[in-house]
Image (cartoon, grey):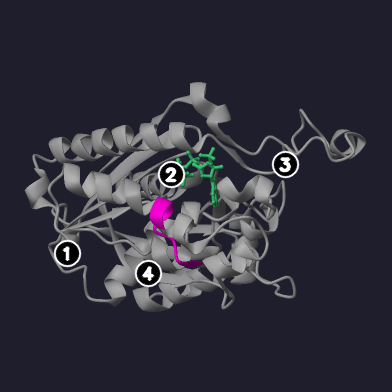
């Protein structure tokens, strides 16, 4: 049986930085509240005049990842694209990347698992490689949140949290089973779908109905029961990390680097404390980017790698929790 290793990493965020003070000009919020509750100092939002979208940013990140892998676009066999903010209702962003990068007519799928999107995406790619079907897969996570947020005081509980950006990696076949993705662990609990949701536009609630509501129906903005999500996140993060460690006969002391989905610095700190991890063992960058949902783990992994924090033979743990609910972890021997 084959295994899969990450051979190239890249990320892209729009230049436009939006600080907490900038947000306080749009809504009743302040830097102190945002930093204290979330750890976020600033985020990148695509400006109105830009051509960036989830697919465009994903393609930019992918280009870097392919270059760094030493491969060319013609060596890629398949694309897995995770996003909750696709350019179109359909088709997905994966096929757009195939076109934007002028790749051969390889297969492309979109993964719609929100904050766990990258975990689901890399796990999916890993299975295609482990079975021998594909050799090199492009895995992308990208989000264009800023255009879909309620930037008034009504939406402040959500709008201040989310940022735009994309990350990508190339996952490649290896015959060394001691290296690469050791295991991945995926879960869902649809009972809580309504706790973090964008309900419209949808086939259930189509655009003419939203227009007819004359502004009273705001179900096209993300809704989040933040406290409920937070409480579930800390439990599920801990469970799914332990599940991954147990599967591989590892303990928390074996973790060289933990990269949590960047949902809230307080969630990451809770998990860090629970597992007794030092600051060197955990990588966070939510301070600069906010929550970029499906992009957050792969942007963080890329930054950590660029800073020399991911080394050969390291045990790297990725974990996420979010809308669905969905959650998961991936254990990697680098
Ligand atoms: O990535 C996907 C998964 N997402 C998560 O894991 C997010 C989980 N949840 C959270 O991170 C936190 O629940 C939030 C950051 C969203 C909110 O923090 P909180 O400590 O749970 O605050 P809260 O929602 O209980 O709100 C506390 C107060 C409220 O005012 P009152 O009712 O106490 O007077 C809010 O209206 O803070 C108010 N508030 C704000 N104030 C200033 C809410 N948003 C803001 C804001 N600025 N942006």
Query: Which residue sits furthest top?
Result: 191
Q: Mark 2 to mark 1: distance in Å? A: 24 Å
> Residue 58 location in percent, x, y?
55, 65
Q: Horizontally, is 219 left or right of 317 in the view?
A: right
Q: In whole angstroms, how far apart are the C-alphas of marks 2 and 4?
A: 19 Å
C-alpha gap between disc 3 and disc 4: 33 Å
Q: Which residue is mark 2?
A: 116
Q: Is mark 2 within 8 Å of ligand 1?
A: no
Mark sitting on residue 302: none
- 3D distance between C-alphas at marks 2 and 3: 21 Å
Label 3 to label 1: alpha-carbon separation: 40 Å
Which residue is identified by label 3? Answer: 220
* Residue under the point 16% across and 36% down: 247
Q: Is residue 279 visible?
A: yes
Distance from the alpha carbon under mark 4 to that under mark 1: 21 Å
Q: Residues within 10 Å of mark 3 (few under 14, many from 20)?
A: some
Q: Which mark is residue 9?
A: 4
Of the residues under marks 2 and 1, which one precedes in the sequence?
A: 2
Is 329 included in the stretch rendered in magenta?
A: no
**What residue do we see at 45% from left, 40% from top?**
322
Q: Position of residue 213 (x, y in %)?
A: 88, 34
User: How many labels were placed on the picture?
Assistant: 4
Q: Nearer the viewer, mark 2 or mark 1?
A: 1
**Which label belongs to residue 280?**
1
Span colored in magenta: 36-42
Q: Are marks 2 and 3 in contact (CB under 8 Å)?
A: no
Label 1, residues with CA under 10 Å away: few <14, some 14-19, many ≥20:
few
């Amino acid at each position: 049986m084959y295994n899969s290793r990450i051979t190239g990493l890249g990320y892209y965020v729009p230049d436009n930085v939006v600080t907490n003070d900038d947000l306080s000009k749009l809504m009743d919020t302040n830097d102190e509240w945002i930093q204290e509750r979330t750890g976020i100092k600033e985020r990148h939002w695509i400006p109105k005049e830009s051509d960036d979208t989830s697919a465009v940013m994903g393609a930019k990140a992918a280009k870097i990842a392919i270059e760094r892998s030493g491969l060319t676009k013609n060596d890629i066999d398949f694309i897995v694209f995770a996003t909750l903010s696709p350019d179109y209702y359909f088709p997905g962003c994966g096929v757009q990347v195939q076109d934007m990068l002028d790749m051969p007519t390889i297969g492309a799928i979109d993964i719609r698992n929100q904050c766990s999107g990258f975990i689901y995406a890399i796990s999916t790619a890993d299975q295609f490689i482990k079975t021998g079907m594909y050799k090199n897969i492009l895995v992308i996570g990208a989000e264009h949140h800023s255009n879909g947020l309620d930037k008034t005081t009504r939406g402040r509980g959500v709008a201040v949290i989310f940022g735009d950006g994309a990350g990508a990696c190339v996952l490649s076949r290896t015959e060394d089973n001691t290296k690469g993705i050791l295991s991945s662990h995926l879960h869902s609990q649809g009972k809580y779908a309504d706790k973090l949701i964008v309900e419209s536009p949808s086939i259930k609630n189509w655009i003419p109905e939203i227009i007819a509501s004359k502004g009273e129906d705001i179900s096209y903005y993300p809704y989040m029961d933040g406290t409920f999500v937070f409480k579930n996140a800390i439990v599920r993060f801990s469970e799914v990390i332990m599940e991954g460690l147990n599967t591989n006969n590892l303990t928390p002391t074996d973790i060289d680097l933990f990269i949590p989905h960047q949902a809230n610095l307080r969630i990451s700190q809770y998990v860090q404390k629970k597992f007794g991890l030092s600051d060197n063992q955990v990588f966070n960058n939510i301070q600069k980017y906010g929550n970029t949902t499906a992009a957050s783990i792969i942007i963080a992994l890329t930054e950590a790698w660029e800073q020399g924090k991911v080394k050969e033979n390291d045990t790297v743990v990725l974990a996420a929790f979010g809308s669905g609910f969905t959650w998961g972890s991936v254990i990697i021997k680098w």
